[in-house]
Image: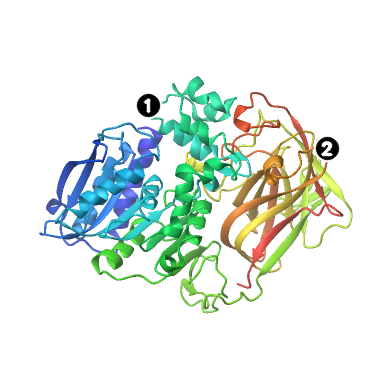
Amino acid sequence: MSDADDFLTRYLADITRQYASSPFRPDAGPETVSFEATQVVCRDGVSLTTDIFRPSGPGPYPTIVVRCPYPNQVGLWKLHGTEMARRGYALVCQWCRGTHTSQGTWEPNVHEREDGRDLLDYLERQSWVRVIGLWGTSYLSLACWLLADIPTPKVVSICANHYGTDRFASAYQKGSFRSDVLTAWAMQNAGHPVDASYEQSALHRPQMDVDVDMWGGRLDWYRDWISHPNGGDAYWGEGFWGLLRGIPARVKVPMFIQEGWFDHHLGSSLIGYETLAPEIKEHSWLRIGCWNHYFLNALEGLEPPHLNTGEVPGALEWFDLTLKRGITPERKVEYYVIGTDMWHEASSWPVVSDAATDTAGDVETDGPAGAQTAGAGEERLYLGADVGIDGGVDGSAIGRTADLGGVLTAEAPSASGSVGYDYDPDDPVPTRGGEALLTTMDEIGARVQPEVGYRPDVLSFVSGVLDHDLHIQGKMRVELYVSSSAEDTAFTAKLIGVDPDGTARNYRSSITTIAMDEPDAPAYRPGDVRKVTVEMWDICWDLPAGSRLRCDVSSSDFPQYAVHTNTAGLWSEQDHAVVAHQRIHCGGSTPSCVVLPVTAG
């Protein structure tokens, strides 16, 4: 059995468990479910295979609609269809154009809006359909978003998981391409079999030619993605992606958006929620849990009892309310706090209210929307170059044989200093834990980190033992004063919690490039000191007293991000790399620091 087959088997078993443990019990056995595969003809004459699962009763039924492009999910949607029909729903799964047994040519994104609307028009004419809810995760969620502003009369709600409407935010981080998400996805969805090494494909130079050189044919849509590393490019604001970006403001029905702290669509998805029309947001839900793209626990070595992972419980709750009972939901925001194993409820996102002090249960309720958070603000920990690092697994100082990093302190060092390393693009730092991952599944999430000094091109800055809890809520960032021998290069930062026993796990990581940190800044002159900011996605994380905070700085994080070649120009056209001599400047007039958005708790 292949790794992919093994994962799918385990995933199906987990979905089965979620249905079995749900308080929304089935009304009938699986033998009562009727199944029909029909063809729905689109406006251009192309027929799309549409699987319909229905309960045994006469109807009309509350109907859940999904549109899927992945043939390997036939078994998954048979499972969902059967379980939903046992609970009184009809479930309609249409296979996207050119996939499974549907006619036409597979072109990602291009036909989903028109084909989806044609399906809804077909269902409006079916007497067995009472009301409709749209459902999907990842690409299937995209299919939901593309209908959210053009629903037919029977559509009353949408449950859209793990996809956002700002495609640039999912594709790039300040000039660095998210290879593990989109290079891998392109290989898997090229429209023809691709028998090539994913890792070698992601490393191929120039990346612009990887489709022809390694994948067996030109993919213009992939070339478009890798040609536009600037979010201000017209490509992202016009055409299909411009349409998608504008949809949240035009959504017509309540939405339930589920996200995970370690899902690669988190940043884009939160943008989608925040830009919903106010009248729709009043009746929509947002839930953010501590899981990855597959709704699985993202904390290596930890099994908190209240993670509540899984997509099925939320979908059943939402559709019972909106489809079966016909109730218009009230706005709700739920989010999980890493470190406390508690869920909080709020009435807005970003949260601007003070957390309640009642902790009797495993859910806290935040105060009234609009209230100022008591004690909210930013806490800075400054990077300091040091001759030794008080941050070993046993708490002892680590002697320096080379630049290892330094310390994090509440006060900025008065004197300037710097630490350096050589960055070789032909020997990138392997990703160990992260949130912008899809294909390298074993590395998604908070993973146990190597010890300080594990590579000469990774600098670790470690705080002393914290004497108070840090309640972090929002977007962390690392402000670095850097210099390089290269005309352009990258800098990464990883924020790591170190337990009292020395176990270290990453909780946020990100990257920037000199050229795209401030796209309108003057061209960089090698050797100059320039301030860059490594910006990270939202998180709610409690780091308890007795812990330490560690910040690892480097210039590569592969395959989470494409390897920077240390040369200037469009990254995907670069065909060679050079070694760069990097320096991180600390203290004095170059106060590099970690900036933490903190609350009073």
Q: Is residue 382 visible?
A: yes
- Residue 118's spot in the image, x, y percent? 26, 46
Q: In the rendered view, would you say 445 is above or below 340?
A: above
Q: Secondary structure at mark 2?
A: loop
Residue 44 vs residue 530, the one in the foreground? 44
* Residue 247 left/right relative to 101: right
| Mark 1 lies on residue | 192
Residue hosting label 2: 527
Left or right: residue 108 versus residue 231 is left
189 with respect to 389 (left or right): left
Whether residue 503 is visible: no
Compared to 569, does 255 lie above or below?
A: below
Name the residue: 56% across, 28% down: 207
Image quadrant containing the C terminus: bottom right
Label 2 is placed on what type of residue?
Gly
> How would you rate the neighbour count of disc 1 (Cα within 10 Å): few for under 14, some for 14-19, many for 20 or more?
few
Viewer-proximal residue among 551 and 125: 125
Tell me the element at label 1: loop
Q: Residue 273, image x and y in percent?
A: 47, 60
